Image: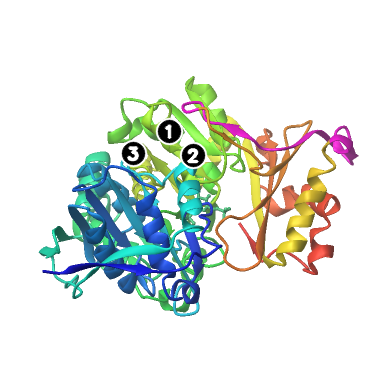
Amino acid sequence: MSAIKTISSTPFSDQKPGTSGLRKKVTVFQREHYLENFVQSIFDSLEGFTGETLVVGGDGRYYNDVAVHTILKMAAANGFGRVLVGQSGLLSTPAASCIIRKYNAFGGIILSASHNPGGPDGDFGIKYNIGNGGPAPEKYTEAMFQRSKEINTYKILDAENIDLNAQGRYTLGDMLVEVIDPVTDYAELMEELFDFPKLKSMFRSGSFSMCFDAMHAITGPYAKQILEEQLGAPEGTVINGVPLPDFGGGHPDPNLAYAKELVETMNGISAPDFGAASDGDGDRNMVLGKRFFVTPSDSLAIMAANAHRIKGYKKGITGIARSMPTSAAADRVAERLGINSFETPTGWKFFGNLLDAGQCTLCGEESFGTGSDHVREKDGLWAVLFWMNIIAERHQSVEEIVTEHWKSYGRNVYSRHDYDAVDATVAGDIIDNLRSRFVSLMGHGFGAYCIEKADDFSYTDPIDKSVSKNQGIRILFTDGSRIIFRLSGTGTEGATVRIYLEKFEPNEALQNIDAQEALADLIDIAEELSGLKAKSGRSGPTVIT
Ligand code: G16
């Protein structure tokens, strides 16, 4: 009989969850009691889970295995009845969401720092998802933070580690542990939503080729099974398909800067028809055509405009939600379809209530995230299959699909400039300074541009009426162009300042212009307003997407 031990510890002051859970350097999580304190703070903030089911899994990054064993023993000591855990402790974020929903679990703990680098000197993260499968809303994360500041003991079972490498049923104290295949449930859901026979015949006929870059992260096994085994894509379609604890030394963020191998392939002379990548935990996606990049904002709009062609969405979509910094391209589609459109703060947790209430079907963010009501997380491979399905239905190239969309709706030219690891005080001062000038900025002209309004985005959730303030500085121009300044909530080093730039181009003749060129004036205005380069001593952004 294993004993439950109560261990004394002292609180840490820095366990405040950010945009998506608690993310810190691995070395921080390795501090004595650090992980345990936070896990106990999660459990102490929840009610009514005795005997219930918890889902546990992570993206396989360094420290995943250690953390999973600790969480299992703490779940047993705290009274959970059953844990479903992915084999080897692996679950992609969307798969975890799918499994929580499918098996009516009480909630889930996902171990990931998403797109942040991994390894002993990299990042680690932990987040709690509620019973709808989605990230815990702010009232939960705030309760966890408050608890973490006062916690002085945690409970853990004194037991041997169970073997997570073999599927099967085990017991830990009174708790049942089921080690499950991480891919099966997710793959079944994808087959319900998309026309697998059609995708299969597209590969079989040789009329379609693709490259999927799993970036040595969690989607490797998912993409290999679904694309290569189930849909018959040639072996080698999935590159970097073996998950590694340090992502092979790479930065598992599917964007033009970090998905280098894929970008080179898609820019080559013999580029396949379609390119895609997903991130560390499998919830982000990047979509590319031959020598053609689809911005995540456009991707959401195009998916919405084509949803009626896709098996799982034929009945129609009720609405589209996007995060505030995401371009307004999706709003134009919602308007034409006569359906709801929502503008929420950054963070997938803000979509949960809208999805649960049936107010929207598709959601998306400029940060390479798209998803729907099939789970309550953004979903990388789902978005890739959605695009493949659009291509199968329309028999057009990615570029043709995007440019036709622009022709029909106009183009929201868009770009994001990131300044990573800026001194946190400097970054905070820049934001405070902008905030203090809202009134004087209104009516201010910069060449052809005139500021109509400047504010700090605030959101009232239409369902539970909760209010989230200070969600990003918006500089809105009279012609509909926007510059947004925001501090990232997912970085672990200094502050990451994000500048989001957007301009609407209705004129077809001007739509094929390079985004940086089209946005050059707004880029200059952003510097004039913020003095970011001058104050941070940087010559330019770390990453442009
Ligand atoms: C997380 C959130 C997203 C958010 C993104 C960027 O993504 O789930 O909703 O858009 O962070 O946040 P920030 O701009 O604050 O860094 P992920 O993929 O890291 O879980």
Residue 110 seen:
yes
Task: Return the residue at label 3.
Answer: 393
**Viewer-nearest of discs 3 and 1:** 1
Task: Return the residue at label 1.
Answer: 353
Mark 2 C-beta to ligand 1 under 8 Å: yes
The quarter of the rendered structure image containing the C terminus is bottom right
Image x and y of residue 275, in percent: 43, 58
Secondary structure of the residue carrying numbered label 3: helix
Q: What is the three-letter code of the residue carrying label 3?
A: Glu
Task: Return the residue at label 2.
Answer: 350
Q: Quadrant of residue 36?
A: bottom left
Q: Residue at x 51, y 58 (%)?
A: 149
Q: Residue at x 78, y 50 (%)?
A: 432
- 157 left or right of 358 in image: left
Q: What is the three-letter code of the residue carrying label 1?
A: Asn
- 200 left or right of 352 in image: left
Secondary structure of the residue carrying numbered label 1: helix
Asked if labels 2 and 1 touch by Cβ distance under 8 angstroms, the answer is yes
Residue 393 lies within the magenta run: no
